[in-house]
Image (cartoon, rainbow, N blue to C red):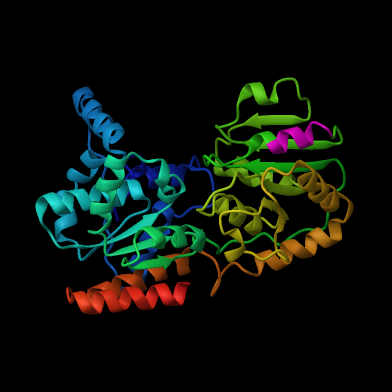
Amino acid sequence: MHLAENKDAERWKASWADGSLVGINDDTPYGYGRANALGCVVSFSKAYPETMAGKFLRYGTRLLLGFDFVHAWRQRKELETADVIWTHTESQYLAVAAVARLKGFKTKIIGQTVWLFDHWSKLSAIKRHLYSALIKRVDVLTFLSPVNMQVAKSHFPDADLRFIPFGIPSETMIQPRAPLPQPFRILAIGNDRHRDWKTLVDVVKQRPDFSLTILSGTVSRRLVAGIPNVDVRLAKSAAELIGAFAAASVVCVPLQDNLHASGITAIEEAVLAGVPVIASDTGGLRHYFSDKEIRYVPPGDQSQLLSALVDVAEQPDRAHQMAIRAQNRMGSGGLGADEYIRNHIRISHDILRRGTDPKAAKAQALDTIARSA
């Protein structure tokens, strides 16, 4: 399992154990260690000690290439001896593919794409050429949204592309509670680059009877300056996040247009906490939850967002039922970390079985695209 340098598995486990890892998590990064209980032997990439010169080299090449080649190069022996390499974002699989090209090893690679095709057209011609060559070394490209996958299909029609719904640990659920009394408390969380904080703040500042808490490190202080009913801070522990969910009347996930299911982690966390959710209708989120489970609003539409917030405030019983239906989507057989990891295992078996027969590989890819379309 090749992850970003700052997602070292030992550091992750220590943060998980002391409660400083914010969010609903496992003791292994993103729950990938669950594959050990499903017939796999999982090892994780490691963060190596760095001198200042080494850090400068790694950061410099990452800035130049757009992916962390040095971190992947340090794992080259482990990458070569694995049966299959899993990756969490394009930054990792592009780096792994570059190492595989240079070293000449044939280890299978599953490359999970998140942001790449949101800005593919804005890449320089040099980077598009480089990334295209590296993507051809990846055996399967996976996506958290079919919207993202369809864009990739237009650029790489012969590639093996698959949609894997992202899931978080869903063993612990808090039963959706009866509506809370006033004041009406809105919670918004997340640091994804496509959060639309301005639209949400502009709506809430018009309603002094609403209270908004944003747990994020990406909100401009200038945006919220002088607005008494908006509080912005970072959650410092998992317990603080759980407490914020418990106090919330609704969780709002405001988003800019995107392709990659931005906000899905925050939505799933809110659903497990039993809180109704309002989210921007973009990024393929409807492939996770229907509009009977989540209240969707058009991205950037202040009037629709205000209307949705007012509806939840004035019709709490209806919002409560929505939260119940959303939570029923989580857990065994539905959305969650177990199914997310099982999908990786299924794909691993597929690509190991088909071997190196190019005709079989292409047939498998075409079949997958047809089933996913």
Can I make out residue 353 in this image?
Answer: no
Q: Is residue 175 magenta?
A: no
Can I make out residue 285 in this image?
Answer: yes
Question: Which quarter of the rendering shows the N terminus?
Answer: bottom left
* Snapshot quadrant of residue 287: bottom right
- Residue plotted at (66% across, 65% down): 327
Residues shaded magenta: 199-206
Is 135 situated above or below 21? Answer: below
- Residue plotted at (58% across, 47% down): 257
Q: Position of residue 179 (x, y in %)?
A: 83, 54
Q: Is residue 202 magenta?
A: yes
In the rendered structure, the answer to whether residue 109 lies left or right of residue 163 reads: left
In the rendered structure, the answer to whether residue 18 lies left or right of residue 355 reads: right
Comparing 251 with 60, the one in front is 60
Magenta stretch: dominant secondary structure? helix
Q: Position of residue 362 (x, y in %)?
A: 27, 74
- Residue plotted at (24% across, 52% down): 134
Q: Position of residue 103 (x, y in %)?
A: 10, 52
Is 245 situated above or below 162? Answer: above
* Snapshot quadrant of residue 171: bottom right
